[in-house]
């Protein structure tokens, strides 16, 4: 005998998904600019810097300065999640925002959103009138090499104080970030451990790093540290990323679609199905710095 799931219960589950997804589903969402998006593609127009012209004569012609324009394309991507509920009485749990089903689906979408953000930060961006021109990551200027050292012969290392200083220099030398703007630095537990191992007890930085690891602070050398274990890793090399909030644009689908109902092909077991769309694009190449860290040392 089939049965119907109360419509109000489905709506309550949908509302819980939306609330939880915004609050604790992703570690990187609040480190980006986020806008609602309902179209397959959204375009964000940008203007580049110009130079002022010195006045060298009286009553001369007014100079016309051509302001460079371009745009970034943000493409939506679709994602879904589903689970089965065997017993009818468990459906009532769906109205509870702390339900294990709610939390489980939210965490799945949160991890996927973080993956999309990470890919956008170091992957290709798309520009041009129709968004068909590829812009690759600027490895020549925005990378800190895995073997970077401040003095002596180059040698592979995990995250060091020297690499942090170099990353800070890359940002400052291009003068693209206003003073006081927080810079998110996504790292893994391996990089936090490395900072402790490579910093001497007598070093003035040690107490700050120690406080960072203990959770007493989350900032150091102008970076706002976020630990996330989903950063790209090739062999022993982990690629950590640093950026200010306006370097990355996230587009969120206008609505989360939730469907809760019986599966006829599964003996009327209840299926919870959630679908949503989101995407991300790097807005400024000069505002993203990548550091390669050897986790084997």
Image (cartoon, rainbow, N blue to C red):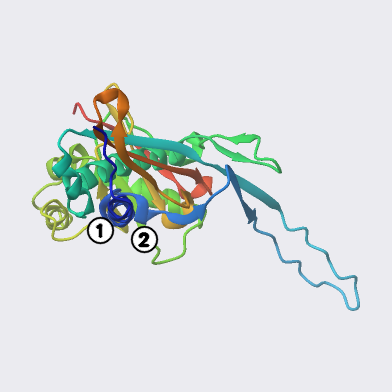
User: Label 2: how many residues lie within 10 Å, few (<14), some (14-19) or many (20+)?
Assistant: some
Q: Is residue 97 above or below residue 130?
A: below
User: Label 1: how many residues lie within 10 Å, few (<14), some (14-19) or many (20+)?
Assistant: some
Going from the N terminus, do you reach mark 1 or mark 2 first? 2
Q: Which mark is residue 97?
A: none
CA separation, marks 1 and 2? 9 Å
Specify whether residue 59 is in view.
Answer: yes
Residue drawn where x is 71% and y is 43% of the image = 129
Residue 245 placement (x, y as % from top left)? 42, 56
Proximity of marks 1 and 2: CB atoms separated by less than 8 Å: yes
Residue drawn where x is 42% and y is 55% of the image = 244
Left-right relation of 181 to 70: left
What secondary structure is marked by label 2? loop
Nearer to the camera, 178 or 13:
13
What secondary structure is marked by label 1? strand
Residue 22 placement (x, y as % from top left)? 33, 55
Residue drawn where x is 18% and y is 55% of the image = 205
Q: Please state, as top left, top right, bottom left or bottom right, where the C terminus lies in the image.
A: top left
Residue 265 placement (x, y as % from top left)? 30, 23
Q: Quadrant of residue 118?
A: top left
Residue 93 placement (x, y as % from top left)? 17, 49
Q: Is residue 142 above or below residue 171?
A: above
* Residue farthest bottom in this picture: 58
Q: Which residue is mark 1?
A: 219
Q: What is the tally of numbered marks visible in this picture?
A: 2
Left-right relation of 274 to 107: right
Left-right relation of 250 to 51: left
Specify whether residue 187 is in view.
Answer: no
Q: Please state, as top left, top right, bottom left or bottom right, where the N terminus lies in the image.
A: top left
Q: Which residue is mark 2?
A: 182
């Amino acid at each position: 005998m089939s049965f119907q799931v109360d419509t109000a219960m489905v709506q309550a589950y949908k509302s819980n998904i939306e609330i939880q997804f915004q609050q604790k589903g992703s570690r990187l969402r609040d480190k980006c600019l986020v806008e609602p998006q309902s179209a397959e593609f959204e375009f964000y127009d940008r203007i580049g810097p110009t130079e002022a012209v010195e006045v060298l004569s009286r009553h001369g012609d007014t100079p016309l300065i051509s302001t460079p324009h371009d745009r970034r394309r943000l493409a939506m991507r679709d994602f879904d999640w589903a689970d089965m509920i065997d017993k009818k009485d468990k459906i009532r749990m769906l109205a509870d925002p702390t339900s294990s089903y709610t939390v489980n689906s939210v965490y799945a979408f949160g991890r996927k959103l973080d993956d999309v953000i990470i890919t956008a930060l170091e992957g290709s961006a798309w520009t041009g009138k129709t968004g068909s021109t590829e812009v690759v990551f600027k490895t020549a200027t925005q990378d800190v090499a895995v073997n970077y050292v401040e003095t002596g012969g180059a040698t592979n290392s995990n995250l060091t104080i020297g690499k942090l200083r170099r990353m800070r220099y890359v940002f400052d030398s291009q003068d693209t970030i206003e003073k006081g703007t927080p810079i998110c630095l996504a790292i893994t537990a391996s990089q936090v451990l490395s900072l402790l191992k490579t910093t001497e007890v007598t070093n003035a930085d040690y107490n700050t790093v120690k406080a960072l690891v203990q959770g007493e602070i989350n900032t150091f050398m102008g970076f706002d540290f976020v630990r996330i274990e989903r950063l790209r890793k090739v062999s022993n090399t982990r690629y950590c990323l640093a950026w200010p909030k306006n370097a990355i644009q996230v587009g969120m689908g206008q609505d989360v679609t939730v469907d809760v109902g019986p599966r006829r092909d599964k003996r009327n077991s209840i299926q919870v199905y959630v679908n949503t769309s989101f995407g991300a694009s790097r807005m400024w190449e000069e505002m993203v710095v990548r550091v390669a860290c050897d986790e084997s040392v």
